[in-house]
Image: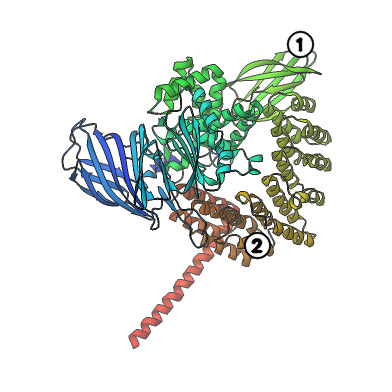
């Protein structure tokens, strides 16, 4: 039966559903949870706490005499209902209460569960200094999404239940405790302080949170509501730099969503060792402290600003309007990701927003082509956390943008505002979004959802163009190349605008635009035009999620690269020009690398120039090293790293020796040094010199260890060097700053592929040890490293890790990495190695048996 779940909808793509995947449904509801009250007493030095969780439940029917709650690895002491002790069964996952008195419909009961927790593995995390990291701050924080709240308190743990909540917690005097809602009171009691927080708007269990630490508190405000940033002491400046735009963002989103920020405060707490980038707990977002920018990092790091916007957007999409089931999580993650685009547009303009959208689309496209293809909405999985992928976030964002393109700006915002207003403080499914769109605009967008949400994939367009000067006809042929010839599956049916651009010196470019319906595998369109157009802009505005390959003549592509106002179209033109290759292509790209006004286009041109295999491409690129924009300089360096010549080595070296205003540029340069030196093996001295140079970089500790991690990455490119490996191994030791250590662990995978068998064993042994560490990011780095290795022994460690890790994300990554390794090793060799190992086991077994026999013989004779 379960085999049916493994049917891939497209044979050329791997299945999203791994063995064991099955449909997931919300459980039946015995009643409505009205309120959850947690009364907690933390014992931080012993990493433990006691708690009383009181759940107020309004039964839906009379006669219920059993209740089943989610509660994992808690030590349950007692269960009372309205003061009367109840008997219960507990198997470390489900708490089954046998009610002394059966329920009466509508008659509210209070279930009080006393419990204690020691060294929790999930849900609530104790961060404390140790011998290796004596300066680590002491903190406690929680992470509920998706189904981890049950690890820190007993509850009906699914998003379909919304309740008010309250947390009272006792912490040491020097610590602050931050939680959802408003602070009711703080009370000092000897050496401890009791914080009492109350969340008066209903929300699901996965959004309940607690963060405790010796934080600096930076106060800001929006319309009289407190906006507070909590960071480790000493990082106040970084906090303002990184989160200071929050009040303006609250203003912006309140206006766009047509709903004033709904909670009594907005706090952002930056915590140590966080296992996500950020988490949008209701009114209290937790962020990783790695997002805090210093002055130099702020130069070319826009990720933090996007992260702040993303989590804030969730306060409406996710927290105010709650998804009923994880299968509909794209509604919130897609909008939060699209809100990054919206904020980029508001703050930096249309070109930046268009480029941001392209980057989001590419993240999804990469997952689709290399990992798996799935419908955005699906309830078939092993663990809900598997859904949190590039389909959910980035493709979801692209879907919101397509809705906007279909409706136009005015109706789009009316639809979004209708959706938020109608569903505030309620749960939603995808159908509710369609209904709100129809209510506000009259439009039925089911056709769009059918194609992009309820099934996997996207159109891959090939566009050819020719001009018939006799009849003055433009011919555009569009092919949906994702569809096999003679097949009808995977076809998309969309109305796409095709624009013809006319340029005139000193005047703005004019466009003649024709919307055409594309619904067949191959269609040709003929457009009678008064004059020959200078260029063609397919999907003008680039609103539809797609890939596109342009097959135009060079002059049209050059004109588009120069004159199309849409940066994404210019980028597509640049890609098509580079694909053509040749000296003319290099000239056009070199010119545009100097002259395009938008850095995003210059960055993409740099990437594409490197793919043209002509010496002249190098000259064009080198000029880009002087670009004023750090992101472009970084792309140029990365491009030069692909042209592995002495000249490119020389061109990049000054960035390593003398530095650059940007950390990321310096890191890219260090990495490039290694990459180039690795192929110039005729010069052994170059490898030595490069190692020496990178060793100097390794002395430069700095923000988030970006630069030193670049040097480690550079060393990992020297795949045959024992010396490079020795250095990398040093940086995987406990005590090395965490970000640098993680880079070191990942580098072990890269450097492994050229090492001799003895060194390969050293690497495997090290990764095997590291795989026993429980911290999420360490496990991820170990998996990444092992996934790059070309020995079946890596698969064995990965399998062990997959079976031991408590984290669903790590489990899935490890299993996918096993497939990677197997593919690399090749099934033949893998079988051979397995057979050898089996033979060895048999031999060992035989020896053991022999020893056992002789022991028995001895004991019998004595
Ligand atoms: Zn999110």
Residue 606: horizontal and vertical position, in percent? 74, 38
Nearest the viewer among 602 and 503 is 602
Rendered location of residue 168, percent (x, y) = 34, 43
Circle 1 SS class? loop
In the image, taking residue 755 as reference, residue 194 lies left or right, namely: left
Place of residue 595 in the rendered image (x, y in percent of width and height, measured from the top left): 78, 31
- Looking at the image, is 258 positioned above or below residue 482? above
- Callout 1–callout 2 Cβ contact below 8 Å: no
Q: Is residue 828 above or below residue 448?
A: below
Is residue 668 depicted above or below 518 in this figure?
below
Q: Is residue 376 visible?
A: no
Query: Quarter-wise, where is residue 674 in the image?
Result: bottom right
Instruction: Name the one closer to the observer, 639 or 740.
Output: 740
Q: Which mark is residue 727?
A: 2
Q: Nearer the viewer, residue 14 or 95?
A: 95
Q: Earlier in the sequence, mark 1 or mark 2?
A: 1
Quadrant housing the C terminus: bottom left
Name the residue rendered at 40%, 25% in the picture.
423
Q: Which residue has dot 1 on it?
A: 530
Number of labelled discs?
2
Instruction: Name the spot of residue 654 as percent of width and height, x first.
Output: 78, 50
Name the residue furthest top: 530
| Relative to 165, 682 lies left or right | right
Count neighbours of disc 2 (C-alpha within 10 A) and say few if under 14, some if 14 to 19, many if 20 or more: some
């Amino acid at each position: 039966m379960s085999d049916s779940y493994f049917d891939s909808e497209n044979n050329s793509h791997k299945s999203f559903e791994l063995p064991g995947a099955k449909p997931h449904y919300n459980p039946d509801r015995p009643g409505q949870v009205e309120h959850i009250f947690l009364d907690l007493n933390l014992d931080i030095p012993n990493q433990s706490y006691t708690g009383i969780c009181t759940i107020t439940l309004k039964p839906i029917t009379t006669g219920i005499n059993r209740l089943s709650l989610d509660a994992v690895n808690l030590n349950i002491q007692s269960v009372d209902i309205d003061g009367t002790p109840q008997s219960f069964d507990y198997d470390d996952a489900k708490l089954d209460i046998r009610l002394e008195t059966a329920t009466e419909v509508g008659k509210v009961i209070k279930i009080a569960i006393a419990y204690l927790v020691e060294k929790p593995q999930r849900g609530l995390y104790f961060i404390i200094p140790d011998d290796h990291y004596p300066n680590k701050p002491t903190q406690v924080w929680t992470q509920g999404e998706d189904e981890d709240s049950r690890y820190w308190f007993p509850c009906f743990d699914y998003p379909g239940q919304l309740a008010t909540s309250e947390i009272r917690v006792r912490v040491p005097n020097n610590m602050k405790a931050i939680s959802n809602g408003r602070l009711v009171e703080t009370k000092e009691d000897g050496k401890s302080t009791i914080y009492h927080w109350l969340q008066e708007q209903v929300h699901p269990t996965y959004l309940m949170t607690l963060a405790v630490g010796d934080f600096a508190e930076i106060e800001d405000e929006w319309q009289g509501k407190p906006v507070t940033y909590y960071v480790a002491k000493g990082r106040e400046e970084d906090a303002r730099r990184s989160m200071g735009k929050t009040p303006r963002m609250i203003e912006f989103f309140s206006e766009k969503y047509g709903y004033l920020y709904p909670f009594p405060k907005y706090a952002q707490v930056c915590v140590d060792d966080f296992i996500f980038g950020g988490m949008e707990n209701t009114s209290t977002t937790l962020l990783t402290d790695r997002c805090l920018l210093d002055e130099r990092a702020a130069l070319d790091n826009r990720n933090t600003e996007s992260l702040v916007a993303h989590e804030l957007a969730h306060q409406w999409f996710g927290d105010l309007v709650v998804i009923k089931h994880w299968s509909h999580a794209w509604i919130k993650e897609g909008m939060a990701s699209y809100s990054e685009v919206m904020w980029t547009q508001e703050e930096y303009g249309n070109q930046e927003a268009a480029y941001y959208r392209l980057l989001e689309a590419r993240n999804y496209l990469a997952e689709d082509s290399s990992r798996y293809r799935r419908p955005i909405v699906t309830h078939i999985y092993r663990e809900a956390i598997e859904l949190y992928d590039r389909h959910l976030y980035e493709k979801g964002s692209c879907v919101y943008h397509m809705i906007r393109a279909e409706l136009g700006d005015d109706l789009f915002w009316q639809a979004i505002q209708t959706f938020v207003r109608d569903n505030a403080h309620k749960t939603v499914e995808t159908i509710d979004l369609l209904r709100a769109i129809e209510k506000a605009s009259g439009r039925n967008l089911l056709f769009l959802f059918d194609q992009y949400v309820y099934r996997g994939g996207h159109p891959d367009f090939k566009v050819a163009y020719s001009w018939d000067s006799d009849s003055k006809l433009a011919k555009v042929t569009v092919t949906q190349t994702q569809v096999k010839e003679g097949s009808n599956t995977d076809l998309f049916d969309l109305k796409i605008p095709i624009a013809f651009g006319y340029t005139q010196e000193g005047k703005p470019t004019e466009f003649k635009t024709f919307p055409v319906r594309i619904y067949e595998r191959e269609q040709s369109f003929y457009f009678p035009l008064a004059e020959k157009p200078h260029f063609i802009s397919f999907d003008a505005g680039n609103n539809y999620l797609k890939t596109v390959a342009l097959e135009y003549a060079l002059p049209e592509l050059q004109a588009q690269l120069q004159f199309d106002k849409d940066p994404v179209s210019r980028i597509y033109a640049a890609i098509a020009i580079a694909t053509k290759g040749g000296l003319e292509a290099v000239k056009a790209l070199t010119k545009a690398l100097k002259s395009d006004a938008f850095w995003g286009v210059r960055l993409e041109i740099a990437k594409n120039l490197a793919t043209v295999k002509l010496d002249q491409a190098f000259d064009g690129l080198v000029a880009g090293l002087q670009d004023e924009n750090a992101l472009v300089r970084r792309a140029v360096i990365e491009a030069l790293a692909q042209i592995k010549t002495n000249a490119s080595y020389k061109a990049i070296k000054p960035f390593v020796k003398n530095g650059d205003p940007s950390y990321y540029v310096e890191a890219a340069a260090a990495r490039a040094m290694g990459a180039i030196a690795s192929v110039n093996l005729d010069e052994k001295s170059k490898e030595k010199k490069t190692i020496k140079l990178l060793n100097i970089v390794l002395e430069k500790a700095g923000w988030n260890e970006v630069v030193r991690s670049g040097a480690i990455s550079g060393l990992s490119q020297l795949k045959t060097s024992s010396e490079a490996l020795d250095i990398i191994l040093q940086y995987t030791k406990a005590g090395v700053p965490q970000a640098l250590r993680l880079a070191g662990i990942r580098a072990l995978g890269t450097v492994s592929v050229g090492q001799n068998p003895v060194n390969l064993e050293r690497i495997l042994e090290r990764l095997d040890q590291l795989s026993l560490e429980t911290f999420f990011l360490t496990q991820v780095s170990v998996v990444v490293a092992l996934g790059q290795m070309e020995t079946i022994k890596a698969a064995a460690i990965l399998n062990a890790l997959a079976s031991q890790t408590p984290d669903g994300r790590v489990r899935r990554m490890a299993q996918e990495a096993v497939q990677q390794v197997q593919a690399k090793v090749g099934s033949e060799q893998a079988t051979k190695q397995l057979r050898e190992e089996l033979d060895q086991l048999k031999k060992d077994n035989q020896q053991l048996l022999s020893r056992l026999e002789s022991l028995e013989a001895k004991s019998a004779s004595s």
